[in-house]
Amino acid sequence: MDVHGRDLRYFAAVAEELHFTRAAERLYVSQPALSKQIRMLEKRVGAALFERDRREVRLSAVGAALLPHAQRILAEWEAAREAVARVVADRAAVLVVGMSTSPGRGGVLPAIRSRFAAARPGARLRLRQVPWNDATAGLADGTCDVAFVWLPLPDPDRYRWLVVAEELRLVAMADTHPLADREIIDFTDLLDEPFLALPDSAGPLRDHWLATDSRGGKPARIGVEVASTEETYEALVAGLGVVLLAAGNTPLLTLGGVVTRAVRGISPSRFALAWRADDHRRLVQEYVRACELATGTTD
């Protein structure tokens, strides 16, 4: 018996509605066309599926036996169709990777890209630079699918992350600063210095780069707020304050007139690949896996 999915769908609709007109409306077909299709199915089955009179439509014994199997087949086909659609969309998808700081450390980005391409040859990566006022680098507003971020993140329960680098926090200052001749500076000697700060919208990351947890309750003096590498460099050269930065970002600021020094008494910084906790797409998970392989880390 050769039965098409459409035949089972039409049969199930009539069986569930027990009314040909309502079933036809549900299927967006004409009632005569539906009746004709049911008669053809009954011919293939070799028995009546419905008992009809002027007042009502009832399932026959054969129809009652067929219905649960038809419903299961239709449900399984719908699940298969959705699975295929997900794979097709996945392979043709674009994954947007956000960053406010380049993850160029040790060539990690090309290493991730090559492993991701091997796993998802049809997918494309698009890099998006995000201003420093968004500590999630585009995750919070959904403009990025994954992002390279500095920890801590605001609303941490919304995200998962994989730490890809742990780096000392150094202090950058103008080369004319009175402390610039020291190789290592105690953080206590910086407590009264004006600091360059991220915007308030950066949340806990602002406090991290001010080392608020190492100040013993003493509030930071804010020289000026900065939201880009360029603004930070110009503020440093102008002597508007000092700033903490990750060791890997030193080349971004030591362009002339600025020096960096080791700091004693503060914890390291952590650089991570992050994604939304409720985003379970395979494309995202494949990128995370590629990052694990490239960096030798796990989340």
Image (tube, helix red, strand yellow):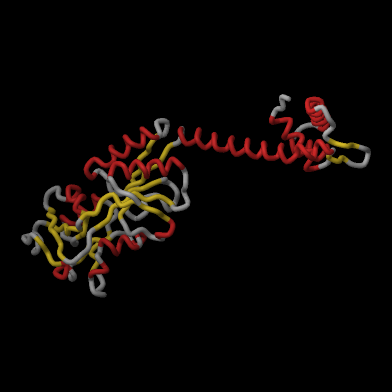
Check the image and report above or below for 189 versus 284. below
Q: Residue at x 20, y 48 (%)?
A: 252
Does residue 61 appear left or right of residue 253 in this picture?
right
Counting from the top left corner in percent of width and height, residue 226 is at 27, 57
Q: Residue placed at 35% from the left, 55% from the top?
A: 135
In this view, the residue farthest toward the right is: 54
Residue 158 position within the rendered picture, expressed as x and y whole percent measured from the top left: 44, 57
Position in image of residue 33 (x %, y %): 80, 28
Foreground residue, 283 or 49? 49
Q: Quadrant of residue 65?
A: top right
Q: Quadrant of residue 129?
A: top left
> Where residue 139 sits in the image (x, y, percent)?
41, 50
Q: Is residue 12 above or below residue 239?
A: above
Residue that extends furthest to the bottom in the rendered view of this protein: 217
Relative to 174, 284 lies left or right? right
Of 265 and 178, nearer the camera is 265
User: Along the horizontal axis of the image, is 177 left or right of 54?
Assistant: left
Count the numbered circles shown: 0
Which quarter of the rendering shows the N terminus?
Answer: top right
